[in-house]
Image: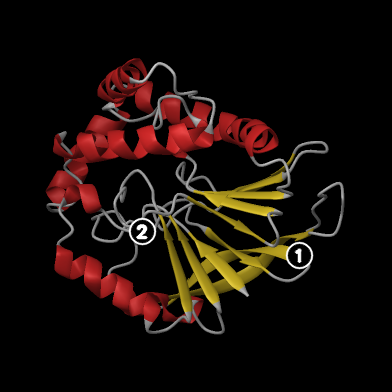
Amino acid sequence: MIRILSDLHLYDARTQVRALGQLEPLLAGVRTLVLNGDTCEMRRGATPAQLAELKAFFRERVPDVVFITGNHDPAISDTHELLAAGGRVWVTHGDVCFDDLTPWSRHVPEIRRLVAAKRAADPTADFAQLAVRFRIAREVAREETDLPDRTTRNWWAHLVWAWHTFFPPRQPWAMLRCWRDLPGLADRLAVAQRPNARVVVMGHVHFPGVWRRGTGPVVINTGSFFRPLGGNLVDVLDDRVQVRRIVRDGDRFQPGRLIAEIPLDDAAGRATG
C-alpha cells in the first residue's frame, strides 16, 4: 500500500504535529510513504539536525519513503512528482497549478517578480511544461527564503502573523479563490501533461476535498495538519484509491472514516463514497 500525506509543516508554530511520534499510527502497515510537499519548514530555519531526524524517523518505520518537494521545503529532495499505479495516479504538491505559485501569500508581488524574471531569463522555455514550472517554482521558493515570515518564533509572533494574514482582507479572498480554482486547474494540467492520470493528489492550499469533473481525473486535495480544516490521507491500492479523514486520538493521529473510494480500473475515473 502507498500512503500519501501532505503539508505536515513540521517546525511551524501552527502545525498540530508537535512531536514526530504523534504520526506513528499513520505509518502502520504502509509499504511506501509519500510525503507530498511542505513536510517541514526549510525556509524558516529548520536545522540540518532536524531535517536528518525527521527523515530517519520515517525511514526507520516505512520500507520506502518518498519526499516530494513543496514551496516550503524546496530542497528536501530532487523529486517534484510521483506517478503511481502505472501512471494512473499523479502526485505533486500543487503550487505549479498557479502561475504565481502561492496567490494568497503576502509575498505574492515578490513571487510574481521572481517568476517573471526567470521566465524572461529563458524565453525559449515553455512555461506550460511541467519540467519548466517545477524548476522555476523551486528556484523561486529558495530565493524567497529571506522574505519576512513570523510563524515559527513564538505564539505572539503567530498572532502577528494572523493579523497580517487577515487584514487587509485581500489574502482571505485570494485563498477562497484558490480553493475554488484548484480542482479545475489541476484537471487541466493533468489532461495536458499527465493524460494517463485517473486520480490527481495535491496539497498546498490546505483545503481537503475530492472533486469529480466529468470524464477528467478525480482531483484530491489532502488538506494539512493545520486547524481548523485539518487533513485527509490517500491510500493507493492495487485497484483503487481510498481517501480517509485523519483524526486525532489524544496526542496521536490515525486513519479515520472512509471519505471516498476511486476505482482505478474504471475508464471514466468515477469515484464512490
Mark 1 and mark 2: Cα distance apart in space = 25 Å
* Residue placed under numbered mark 2 in the picture: 39
Counting other residues with Cα less than 10 Å from the Cα at mark 2, is it few (<14), some (14-19), or many (20 or more)? Answer: many
Specify how the rendered protein is coloured: secondary structure
Residue 212, image x, y percentages: 75, 42
Amino acid type, callout 2 = Thr
> As rendered, which of 208 and 200 lies closer to the eye?
200
Residue 193, image x, y percentages: 63, 36
199 above or below 111? below
Residue 148, image x, y percentages: 15, 35
Counting other residues with Cα less than 10 Å from the Cα at mark 1, is it few (<14), some (14-19), or many (20 or more)? Answer: some
Amino acid type, callout 1 = Arg
Lower sequence index among marks 1 and 2:
2
From this viewpoint, is residue 251 visible? no
The mark found on residue 15 in the picture is none
Residue at 29 percent across and 51 percent down: it is 75
From this viewpoint, is residue 5 visible? yes
Q: How many marks?
A: 2
Say left or right for 40 vs 155: right
| Quadrant showing the C terminus | bottom right
Location of residue 109 (image quadrant): top left
Residue at 29 percent across and 36 percent down: it is 139
* Residue placed under numbered mark 1 in the picture: 240
Which residue sits furthest front?
124
74 above or below 127? below
Say left or right for 90 vs 206: right
Residue at 70 percent across and 60 percent down: it is 86
263 above or below 249? above
